Amino acid sequence: MAVNKLENMLKESLKKAILKASLAEDFEADKITIEIPKDTAHGDYSTNIAMQLTRLLHKNPREIANALIENFDLEEAHVERIEIAGPGFINFFMKQDVLTSIIDEVINEGKNYGFTDTGQGIKYNIEFVSANPTGDLHLGHAKGAAVGDAVVRILRKAGYDVTAEYYINDAGKQITNLALSLYSRYLDLFGIQRDMPDDGYFGADVKDIAVKVKEDYGDRFVAIKEDEAIAFFRKLGTEHELQKIKDILKEFRVHFDYWFSETSLYSENMIEPVIDLLKEKGYLYEKEGALWFRTTDFKDDKDRVLIKKDGTYTYFTPDIAYHKNKFDRGYDYLVDLFGADHHGYINRMKAAMQALGYNENQLNIDIMQLVQMVENGEVVKMSKRTGNAVTIKDLIEEIGVDATRYFFVSKAANTPFEFDLGLAKSQSNENPVYYAQYAHARMCSVEKNAKEKGFEISTHYELLGNMKEIELLKHINEFRNEVDDAARLRAPHKIANYIQRLAQLFHAFYNDCYVLDEANKELSEQRLALVEASRITLANALELLGVSAPEKM
């Protein structure tokens, strides 16, 4: 169901007309589509319900449209007039007072404008980023952070109970290699040669940590047993790298409610009970010395190994236990935001959850496509600062948090994305984040000037009727619907699209309508109210993407 009052009002009135005209014994208002026509000559709102009913009634759609109009209560729906267009579209021209009532709604609700209760407190766990704590977060992680955090913000705005979660991969080979690398660099400081692991970490960061250990502990780890030393460096290295991740994510305005350690799956014995449960359910079998999971029973393309010949787990096994743990914590739905290299992961993990008794729709795995960084038409692969891969820190230093976040969410996450650094740095209308923020700054400037000149925001709006004003009002009214849709589809780019259109409509209104006219103070104060409603809506929309709304630029 639409969540803005004007569309709901039209839907309910149309439903009553359907029943009154005896076109159906019952009809759900939610099945009725209401849209804003691209051409304002076709009314404020339009519906194709007559064509929809044609399939049900086998009648001419214009005949159905006429029957609906004859039984439609104009007064109840606050409609000035109705027209039939084309094959049977019904166009509604709203009364001016119901359109301008949107201003009061926005101003009264303020920062809460756009909130809906669609989610009804349904519990979601959103896992995103979850990079190994072994180095800096790169482009793919930056996209995941921006998209994931925006999804969390939008779902909360739509009334869902959301936990943002980070899965710390602190039990795998990468962490062992980090520990061994640190140990080798530490020993090297005492002239003791120890080979670096094949997949070791050779960056300056590892050397710096080793130097700090020497400063703090001296030669304590030279003489002790190797396994004890490695255990120390494992813990130290993980904590150091994880803190770096937490710090840069905080700077990037990304908050996690829960940090889950992979190690806890082992220390708290969460894996074996899951294997036992799958055995009890009859989904496991032995073959060639390994333990297999019959995931093909649940549409996977092949069965998967859980325990290898050597008795060790595959990566898949602890992941099953982890997802079960999330459900055990009381979540209704799980969402994993993964990179393009995880596409094959979807079917096997959905199979595992179904085997454990969950509905396949309770686990959603959203795949984010690759990002390519370009500047001046050239692909940028390396950091100017370090000579390594481009990181979140590079982007923040180069173009700021706002531009970075906005650009990453401006396109659908499941499509390949070309990040244009030059465009992101430009102060022009072609730069979408600059265009949107400039609109907000302009709104603030108008309100500041108005205050200095003694204008006050009006509480009545009978003089508003310019087409640019009406178009802007209708778009403001669509905000709840956009939040609802973006939450349902986990699609923050829909909010970015909404923001661009809002900025466009505001600039058009500002250029066409003289807002602060001392010779026409009453109209100016009513227009000032529309500016304030626009400002609130734009600020709230930008907040959903984690982007600031500057008062001046």
Image (cartoon, helix red, strand yellow):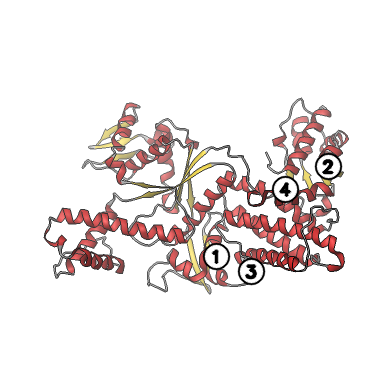
In the depicted structure, whether residue 408 falls above or below residue 333: below
Q: Residues within 10 Å of mark 4 (few under 14, many from 20)?
A: few
Q: Residues within 10 Å of mark 3 (few under 14, many from 20)?
A: few
User: Is residue 197 among the parts visible in the rendering?
Assistant: no
Q: Which residue is mark 3?
A: 552
- Checking the image for residue 105, the label placed there is 4
Q: Position of residue 241 (x, y in %)?
A: 33, 59
Q: Secondary structure at mark 3?
A: loop
Measured Cα–Cα span from mark 3 to mark 4: 26 Å
Measured Cα–Cα span from mark 4 to mark 1: 30 Å
Q: Amino acid at mark 2?
A: His
Marks 1,3: beta carbons within 8 A:
no
Marks 4,1: beta carbons within 8 A:
no
Q: Amino acid at mark 1?
A: Ala
Q: Nearer the viewer, mark 1 or mark 3?
A: 3
Q: Amino acid at mark 4?
A: Glu
Q: Amino acid at mark 3?
A: Lys
Measured Cα–Cα span from mark 1 to mark 2: 42 Å
Q: Which residue is mark 1?
A: 403
Q: Secondary structure at mark 4?
A: helix
